[in-house]
Image: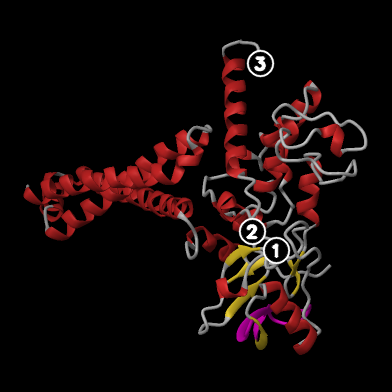
Amino acid sequence: MSTLKVSLEIFRYKKGQPAHYDPFTVEIPDNAHVIDVIDTVWAKHDPSLTFRRACHHSSCGSCALRINGVEKLPCITRLTDVWNGIKPIRIEPLRNFPVVSDLVVEVGDFFERMSAAGMTITCEAEGFLPLTVDTFAVADVLPRAVELPDNLALFNRFEQCIECGICMSACPTMATDSKFIGPAGLAAIYQARHKTDDPARVKHLLGLADGEHGVWRCHSAFECTEACPQAVDPASKIMALRRELTLRRLRKMFGLRI
Amino acid sequence: MSTLNYSRTKQAARWFDIRQRKVGMWAYALNRITGIGLVVYLYLHLGVLSMLMRGQSAWDAFVALARSPLYLVLDVILLAGILIHGLNGLRLAFTGLGFSVGAQKALFIILMVIGAIILLVAGLKIFAV
């Protein structure tokens, strides 16, 4: 293992000061991830640098930011994948979120949208859910029986969502409609809608999706799906919601049962 | 809490920023550019048609201008915009209702190739007249 001398340009913003980029040069092992480089800048060069990080293994979504203009999780992005030895690595906060300080953005509105769909990630039981039920018997793994949906793969797909906000940053519609529910929120609505048979709850969720800042604001850039580090594929969920809403309207128009 | 927010102009400029972006975003940006172009053309077209109210000589003068090489090039550019916007619009209508979302990139490329072939044939005919 050798060390690399890496150049960076990091976005800086503090209240009352203009936004700008600060250059840094750090020596770091060549097997480091980008989050390690940012950590080193903070520890050895500038402790006023503010950024978020927690799990270091793409489970929490806290560290999401832009590396060379592309939304990524720096905890799983290898330094050697973004450093070409010549041009400084550019580190910037996520787009479409108000910047609080340096690389930290305001995420309160974002989490409110996820809550509106009833899909904030909470752990209700200890243990883990395997991706395929033919690998483990559920009763062997969990201390008490848990009812799993028939379409387990579908739910596992969304449950990979770590609410990192990368899709919201990549979405061009979010740039000009701050109230747009956004890819993560709409994917959460899709998930919540397919987890319930309660007509009132379905009506509420579809009403959210059909609203002024719902699915119809999506203009099909598909960048959310491209950027998502967890393969949630929010674009497909948005289009599926559109299909359901359109079919419901057509049925209603022709007096058919919805 | 005090935060840094960008102007709406700067935010809207993101519609056209395709750096580091994939095929879906290129299609998105192209659709907006051609859409704006077609709206501008519509107003120009209405302006041109209003020349009919000024009598035959005014109209004939315009038709002579419209046959010049520069205008023929503009016609080809107009046709390109119509093809890109129309064919991509078909793709959006299809994927927007949840069909073949996973194939949206391939759909875009195939439709643009078809559009390019149509444009080539039409362009040759335009300049042959």
Which residue sits at x=38%, y=51%? Answer: B34
Mark linked to residue A64: 1
Whether marks 2 and 3 lie on the same chain? yes
Q: Residues within 10 Å of mark 2 (few under 14, many from 20)?
A: many
Mark linked to residue A258: 3
Left or right for A47, reference A167: right
Quarter of the image for the N terminus of chain A: give it.
bottom right
Contact (CB < 8 A) between labels 2 and 1? yes
Range covered by the magenta-colored residues: A1-23
- What secondary structure do most residues of the magenta stretch adopt? strand
Quadrant housing residue B104: top left
Amino acid under disc 2: Ser
Q: Picture coordinates of residue A129 (x, y %)?
A: 79, 40
The CA distance from mark 2 to mark 3 is 35 Å
Circle 1 marks a residue in which chain?
A
Q: Residues within 10 Å of mark 3 (few under 14, many from 20)?
A: few
Amino acid under disc 1: Ala
Q: Secondary structure at mark 2?
A: helix
Q: Which residue is situated farthest in the left direction here? A: B128
Amino acid under disc 3: Ile
Q: Secondary structure at mark 1?
A: loop
Quickly name the residue at label 2.
A169
The tag earlier along the polypeptide, 1 or 3, is 1
Q: Picture coordinates of residue B59 (x, y %)?
A: 15, 47
- Mark nearest the camera among 1 and 3 is 1
